[in-house]
Image (cartoon, helix red, strand yellow):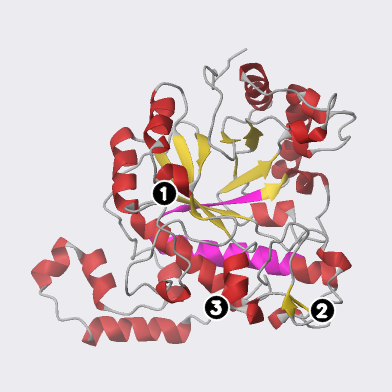
Amino acid sequence: MKKFKMAAATALLFSGLATGTALAAEEQAQDFTTRTYNAVEIPSEVLASSQLFKYSSGLNFEYPDAVRGIFVTGHSAGGARFESLIDLIGSSDLNAMVIDIKEDFGYMTYVPEEGSKLAEYEIGQPYIKDPRAMLERLEQEQIYPIARVVVFKDSALAERKPEWSFVDGGAIWKNGRGESFVNPYMQEVWDYNVEIAIEAAKMGFKEIQFDYVRFPEGFENRADTLQYSKGEYGGDEYDGTQSRVAAVTDFVAYAREQLEPYDVDVSVDIFGYSATLPEAPGIGQNFSMISENVDVISSMIYPSHWTSYFGIAKPDLEPYNLVAEYSKVENAKLAELENPPVSRPWLQDFTASYLGAGNYLRYGKAEVEAQIKALNDNGIDEFLLWNAGNSYTPGVDYTPLD
């Protein structure tokens, strides 16, 4: 893992504090953290290691008894559907929203303010016209806010920075769905995504959820033909698999450290099957190593996304059994860790008709409740519901007890 040079930065910090501030002692006493933070350019690695500097957005959210959340797109968060989703949460035992701040194509769902480091990339979209007002509305309702940041799947940044991406025959590489990825080996890509996360934390989000923290699927089959930099991961100490695992894990650790001053939790979405393997070699996800560096791990365990697994021939037809069997595997994996994160899996609230007749169920109240009960029966109290269109099943009991 990368080492951070602290001594020189620390000396710079305290030199700046001694000579660079002209605030009256009374003003310092009134608001030491904010004023000193704003008055001195403090190196991020010093901020990350210090307990003296904690950023406050001015918003107050309490962590729920257990997070029970829904996914919300930027369009929904900034549009008419937002109030109906608030009503859904207010009339049920749901209590959290995972809101797109950087979405699947790499666009930010709001326009960064002038002066933001991110403004130069011109990747902001005005879906959420006033993020602060949106968060104040959530504070009013005490709905726990989680910012979703899609990391390495990023067509927008790849187009603007081909040198930060993967190139195939002189053109930016795209997968079968026409999507591009940026390069997880590159520090520049890390810092870009961390800056987005920091902006979200400053807005008032209480948790940053990183998604697509991985290489493209099947990358092991093209690792030797695409053109890209391996940065610090090209040495003889790494084989292909280990270099990918190291890069992904190091990004997570780095992001968490950089976000430490902002008093937010860090979570990562991860393929469910990663917990069933020593590591997913092509994409660089090692369940245990990522889990050691986050506050929350969110495995995507939609029954529709499994093939024949756990002895279940058609997993989408057996939501309870699939989730229960997965939970047993994950519980055992997390039990091996000294400081395991909170488990908060993603569950399915959509119908996977693309699986074909006889292979899928129409998901509704019974199927959603079956997944939640399977988690509860295995000691997992938190969950998130995924529906890409944010159209969630009505009438669900989100805390079934038996």
Q: Are marks 3 and 1 in contact (CB under 8 Å)?
A: no
Depicted 201 relative to depicted 313: above or below: below
Name the one closer to the observer, 155 or 236.
Answer: 155
Give the magenta range: 245-269
Q: CA distance from mark 2 to mark 3?
A: 20 Å
Residue at the disc numbered 3? 4
Mark 1 vs mark 2: in front: 1
Query: Hey, what amino acid is under mark 1?
Result: Lys
Disc 3 and disc 1: Cα gap in Å?
Answer: 26 Å
Q: Nearer the viewer, mark 3 or mark 1?
A: 1
Instruction: Give the mark nearer the N terminus: 3 vs 1.
Output: 3
| Image coordinates for residue 161, horizontal then vertical, percent | 59, 78
Alpha carbon separation for disc pair 1 and 2 = 38 Å
Instruction: Residue 300 in the image: state x and y as whole percent.
Output: 68, 42
Taking the image as shown, residue 63 lies to the left or right of residue 369, namely left
Residue 30: name its quadrant. Answer: bottom left
Chief secondary structure of the magenta portion = helix
For the residue labelled by badge 2, is the local secondary structure a helix, a strand or a loop? loop
Residue at 64% from the left image edge and 34% from the top image edge: 347
Give the mark nearer the N terminus: 1 vs 2: 1
Query: 10 Å neighbourhood of mark 1: few (<14), some, or many (≥20)?
Result: many
Q: Which mark is on residue 237?
A: 2
Q: Is residue 80 left or right of residue 196?
A: left
Depth check, front residue: 197 or 276: 197
Give the amino acid type for the residue marked by disc 3 in the picture: Phe
* Amino acid type for the residue under numbered disc 2: Glu
Quadrant of the snapshot with the C terminus: top right
- Element type at mark 1: loop
Residue at which label 1 appears: 206
Q: Is residue 117 in view?
A: yes
What's the residue at 52%, 17% (across, down)?
A: 395
Mark 3, secondary structure of its residue: loop
